[in-house]
């Protein structure tokens, strides 16, 4: 990609060198205006996410657009076919380079297959939920699980990724199928009673987005290092549709809070043979999912006493506070304050809750919000940690953040011994 960009840059320089100063100025102004338009459109399309294009991304887009305008000018004014072809090739090279640079920073399409809609296969076998082994009469119990776990001689080596419908029986929320990861130990006989990690994806998105953020690889690697033991992971749908933003509240937008706090744990207890004690359950997520994690841990500490908030907001948001309150509670600020985690933490202590806040050092919009939530959680008596990782609002932060905290989540939920 670097070679393509260099070649395109040399071609652009050659083309510009033969243009008048006035023509270069016009092309440059047009490229700057178009770049501003691109940045604004991307920001508006993905709100309430932060600006998606970093400074260097905007720069390479501007250069690519300049090359396009120069190519148009050369084609319109020049009678030389060779010069026109060279300008067009330079523009194509710089556009391809810009696409590569932006995609590398945003991390949306890690492979050509992802661009075509194909996600990389997980490191665990895919199966229908009907293929998941049912309850066993003999199970290994005890805490921490690792202290009592005796893996069978013919131990299962691979985990399982499957999907399941989790109906909103109490909430009435209509969700898309959830993603479920079962570690190797769950598939063994006799199986241990494993803890449960509930994860929520970002917005816009879907549960399977967690596969693109290293879920299967991370948990499988953890299980391989711990004799097949890892949490059972359930990724419910907290949106209802890819472009929906119901927020993790019970409001006019849907009863997502009740869905995650009541329907999901009830389904897990009824369909998976796991440790269903509250202390063996944690919730986590990134971006929208991170906001959901602190929301649920704050409002339902008896259900989710452990949380992982990666790049979440300091309140549920549709982009603007007033618009959010209007859409969720018809403008009733007091109703919103009774469920917004930061407001709740200002009035109520949560000493039994423990969590971690992780955010990108370059995430200029969400980093201050994460810091505010960390301060509020600590002031409310939560046992919390906060740290920053290199990167912005992307998988560059969420993949290592999840991998780095999985050991802590396993210890907090009783899978491994607590740190002395």
Image (cartoon, helix red, strand yellow):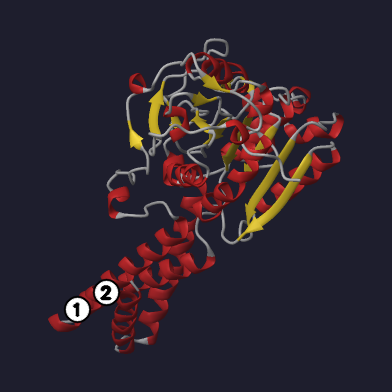
Choose the circle earlier in sequence order: 1 or 2: 2
Q: In the rendered image, which quarter contains the N terminus? A: bottom left
Residue, far front: 153
Q: Nearer the viewer, residue 170 or 335?
A: 170
Q: Residue furthest bottom?
A: 17
Give the residue number, with chain letter if any, for mark 2: 71
Rendered position, 235 above or below 274: below
Residue 35, quarter of the rendered image: bottom left
Q: From the viewer's perspective, tell me whether residue 322 is left or right of residue 24.
A: right
Other residues around mark 1 within 10 Å, as few (<14) / some (14–19) / many (≥20): many
Q: Nearer the viewer, residue 244 or 235?
A: 235
State which quadrant residue 163 falls in.
top left
Label 1, label 2: how far apart the Cα atoms are:
7 Å
Q: Which residue is mark 1?
A: 84
Q: Are marks 1 and 2 in contact (CB under 8 Å)?
A: yes
Is residue 212 visible in the rendered image? The answer is yes
Q: Position of residue 7 (x, y in %)?
A: 29, 80
**Label 2 SS:** helix
- The percent coordinates of residue 265 (x first, y second) are 58, 20
45 relative to 84, above or below: above
Instruction: Judge whether residue 318 can be spotted in this image.
Output: no
Relative vertical location of residue 9 with respect to residue 111 in this rendering, above or below: below
Q: Nearer the viewer, residue 153 or 121?
A: 153
Residue 234 as seen in the image, left or right of residue 382:
left
What x and y, as percent, mark residue 245?
53, 32
**Helix, strand or loop at disc 1?**
helix
- Residue 203 — which label? none
């Amino acid at each position: 990609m670097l070679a393509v960009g260099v070649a395109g840059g040399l071609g652009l320089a050659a083309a510009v060198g033969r243009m008048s100063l006035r023509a270069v100025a016009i092309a440059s102004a047009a490229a700057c205006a178009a770049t501003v338009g691109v940045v604004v459109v991307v920001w508006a399309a993905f709100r309430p996410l932060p600006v998606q294009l970093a400074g260097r991304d905007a720069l390479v887009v501007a250069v690519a657009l300049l090359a396009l305008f120069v190519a148009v000018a050369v084609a319109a004014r020049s009678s030389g076919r060779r010069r026109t072809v060279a300008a067009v090739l330079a523009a194509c090279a710089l556009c391809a380079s810009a696409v590569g640079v932006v995609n590398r920073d945003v991390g949306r399409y890690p492979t050509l297959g992802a661009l075509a809609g194909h996600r990389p296969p997980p490191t665990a076998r895919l199966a229908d939920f009907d293929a998941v082994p049912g309850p066993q009469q003999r199970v290994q119990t005890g805490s921490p699980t690792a202290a009592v776990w005796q893996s069978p001689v013919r131990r299962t080596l691979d985990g399982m990724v499957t999907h399941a419908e989790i109906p909103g029986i109490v909430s009435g929320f209509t969700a898309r199928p959830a993603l479920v990861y079962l570690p190797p130990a769950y598939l063994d006989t006799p199986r241990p009673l494993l803890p449960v990690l509930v994860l929520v994806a970002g917005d816009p998105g879907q549960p399977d987005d967690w596969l693109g953020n290293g879920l299967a690889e991370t948990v499988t690697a953890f299980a391989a290092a711990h004799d097949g033991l890892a949490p059972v992971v359930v990724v419910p749908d907290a949106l209802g549709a890819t472009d929906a933003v119901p927020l993790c509240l019970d409001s006019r937008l849907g009863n997502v809070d009740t869905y995650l706090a009541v329907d999901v744990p009830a389904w897990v207890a009824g369909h998976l043979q796991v440790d269903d004690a509250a202390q063996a359950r944690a919730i986590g997520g990134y971006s929208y999912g991170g906001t959901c994690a602190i929301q649920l841990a704050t409002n339902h500490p008896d259900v989710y006493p452990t949380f992982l908030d990666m790049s979440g907001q300091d309140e549920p948001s549709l982009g603007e506070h007033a618009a959010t309150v209007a859409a969720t509670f018809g403008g009733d600020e007091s109703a919103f304050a009774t469920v917004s985690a930061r407001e709740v933490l200002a009035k109520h202590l949560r000493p039994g809750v423990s969590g971690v806040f992780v955010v990108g050092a370059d995430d200029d919009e969400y980093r201050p919000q994460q810091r505010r939530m960390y301060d509020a959680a600590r002031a409310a008596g939560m046992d919390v940690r906060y740290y920053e990782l290199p990167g912005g609002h992307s998988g560059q932060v969420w993949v290592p953040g999840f991998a780095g905290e999985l050991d802590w989540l396993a210890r907090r939920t009783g899978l491994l011994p607590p740190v002395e």
